[in-house]
Image (spheres, rainbow, N blue to C red):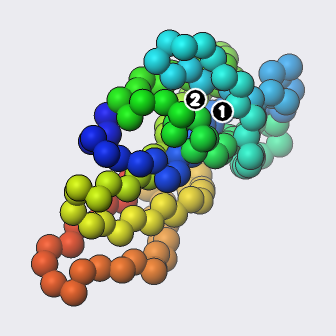
Amino acid sequence: MDLATCSNVVFAGIYWGGRASTGDLEFDDRGDIRIDANGDGNTDVSADVIIDAAAAEGLGNRVYYCFADKTTLVQSNPSQSLYTVADIYARLGGTNRWGGWNIVVVYENDLLPMRNLNVFDGLVNANNTGTEVEVGISGFLTPASGPVTFEVRAL
């Protein structure tokens, strides 16, 4: 993370997930990870929310997603920080195995142009390749005039 001078973090959430199996010993720990900021040592993190989704009917395979509010942790570190994460559970062996994480940081800075930011937190599950999914999004405020940019990222 490399925020501009005078930036103030107002929200930071960490999201992680992976392919899981209910039969694995580590399955019950999928909501627990460790995060390190700047090499200062790991902090244990437990999910505020765990979402399980069936990946293959009847096989015990699951895809899971977790969220934890880590605003206080990010606020307590410098605005130029390196975060690393450990112990994300992901099933080993076979094909189509994965695990990953990201941090969403919302900040304010009176020295930068005014922006309106919305974080839409949710899950779209389309099991078939090529399946189109329509997601309605509303509630955006835009300037009365001038350029408006918009970006959607699928995670």
Above or below, 31 against 145 in this view is above
Residue shown at 57% from the left, 44% from the top: 71
> Left or right: where does residue 60 sit relative to residue 142?
right
Residue at horizontal 48%, vertical 25%? Answer: 83
What amino acid type should be assigned to the residue bearing mark 1?
Answer: Arg
Which numbered circle lies on residue 19? 1
C-alpha span from label 2 to label 1: 7 Å
The residue located at (86%, 20%) in the rendering is 25
Which of the two labelled residues, at mark 2 and mark 1, occupies the earlier sequence position?
A: 1
Q: Is residue 59 visible?
A: yes
User: Residue 45 at what x, y percent from top left?
Assistant: 70, 31
Task: Please tell me whether residue 81 is drawn above or below residue 150 in the rendered image.
Answer: above
Could you tell me which residue is drawn at 35 percent across and 47 percent down?
7
Query: Visible in this render: residue 54?
Result: no
Q: Residues within 10 Å of mark 2 (few under 14, many from 20)?
A: some
Q: Secondary structure at mark 2?
A: strand
Q: Nearer the viewer, residue 81 or 46?
A: 81
Q: Which mark is residue 99?
A: 2
The residue mark sitting in front, 2 or 1, is 2
| Mark carried by residue 147 | none
Image spot of residue 85 (x, y percent):
56, 23
- Figure check: 133 above or below 70: below
Residues 143 and 24: in front is 143
Q: Do the residues bearing badges 2 and 1 touch, measured as CB atoms within 8 Å? A: yes
In the foreground, 33 or 3 = 3
Eyeballing the image, is 144 above or below 21? below
Q: Relative to residue 34, is residue 10 drawn left or right? A: left
The amino acid type found where label 2 is placed reads Gly
Q: Secondary structure at mark 1?
A: strand
Residue 19 is situated, as x and y percent measured from the top left of the image, at 66, 33
